[in-house]
Image (cartoon, grey):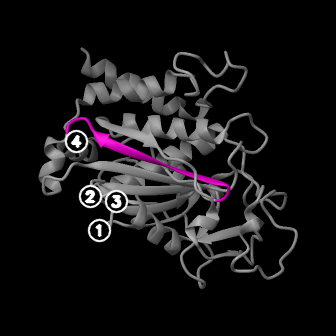
Amino acid sequence: MLRVQGSACYLSACSKNNRNLHSLTGGVKVEEELFKIKECACSFGDSKVSTDVYLKWLRDYCEAFYYGLTVRILDPMPVSHTGCAFRINEYTHNLQIHAGYLLNYLKKKKAKNAFCIVGITMIDLYPKDSWNFVFGQASLTEGVGIFSFARYDSDFYSANYRGRLKTTKKLSAADYSVFDSYYTPEITSKLLLRSCKTLTHEIGHIFGLHHCQWLQCVMQGSNHLEESDRRPLDLCPVCLRKLQSVLGFSILERYKALQRWIEDETNGTEEGHSSKARGGLPKPVEAFTESYELLVKCLNVLQK
């Protein structure tokens, strides 16, 4: 994962069982890389959740969802290092960065043995000047993608959104200082849930999963945030079987890993030490209750 402005990092995932993956990639060792692009290197909004903790939550969730892959986080990268174009949105008056520039940057960072590299950011995106915004953009043939969680903040469309710039003056193309101390929303349970859904949905496309038209599934398409929120957190049986045929995981062990992720309150800073014990905040999983209950039901059936 790479985070842009102030710092950046990426996740790289190596398969623990590459046999099936080799057959899809000409025998090349498969790795998955995620870049996170962010404007603030320290913390999110008014919460005590640091950037590193949030990234580790997402890393661990990806490891459970794509069971059999090992995910690692890269060092941060400032926005200025990407050389990307940026602007102030004329309607929402928040900063935006050009998704196409970031995709080109990610292509250069993608390792030769990588399956894909995906960037996530808390800065809003736009794909071209004529567009208002875009949640994300990807090149499946190149194995790269960039996605923004900025509009998943509950206050984004509010007049009180703290990411609105007080000035609408024309920006200098080379002056990236405008991103210094730029607002980052608080990591709430709903934002974490939405982040997990989007990240696994888009990586699913890179694995070859199309929009699901069979059952309730995280791979269903959506045209707006409300529709996206109605999607479940996990795959339907049809898409789950497709992913299993690629990664070769045990469905039982995958469900157990997802259950552990929800139950585990550790913040990843020290193994075996919960965030409560360290004086911070626990992983906010209140919004995951429905998904957790479904996992328990599935495990009960599989373990009979």
Query: Could you say which disc has been placed on residue 247 in the image?
Result: 4
Sequence-first tag of 4 and 2: 2
Query: Could you say which disc has been placed on residue 141 in the image?
Result: 1
Q: Nearer the viewer, residue 252 or 121?
A: 121
Q: Amino acid at mark 1?
A: Thr
Question: Mark 3: which secondary structure?
Answer: loop
Q: How many marks?
A: 4
Question: Mark 2: which secondary structure?
Answer: loop
For marks 4 and 2, give the one nearer the viewer. Answer: 4
From the image, give the main secondary structure of the stretch colored magenta.
strand
Q: Amino acid at mark 2?
A: Gly
Residue range in magenta is 5-17
Q: Residue at x 59, y 85 (%)?
A: 130
Sequence-first tag of 1 and 4: 1
Question: Mark 1: which secondary structure?
Answer: loop
User: Mark 3 near mark 4, Cβ–Cβ under 8 Å?
Assistant: no
Residue carrying label 2: 208
| Cα distance between the residues tagged 3 and 1 | 17 Å
Asked if residue 150 lies left or right of residue 254, the reply is: right
User: Mark 3 near mark 2, Cβ–Cβ under 8 Å?
Assistant: no
Q: Residue at x 64, y 67 (%)?
A: 80
Q: Amino acid at mark 3?
A: His
Residue carrying label 3: 211
For marks 3 and 2, give the one nearer the viewer. Answer: 2
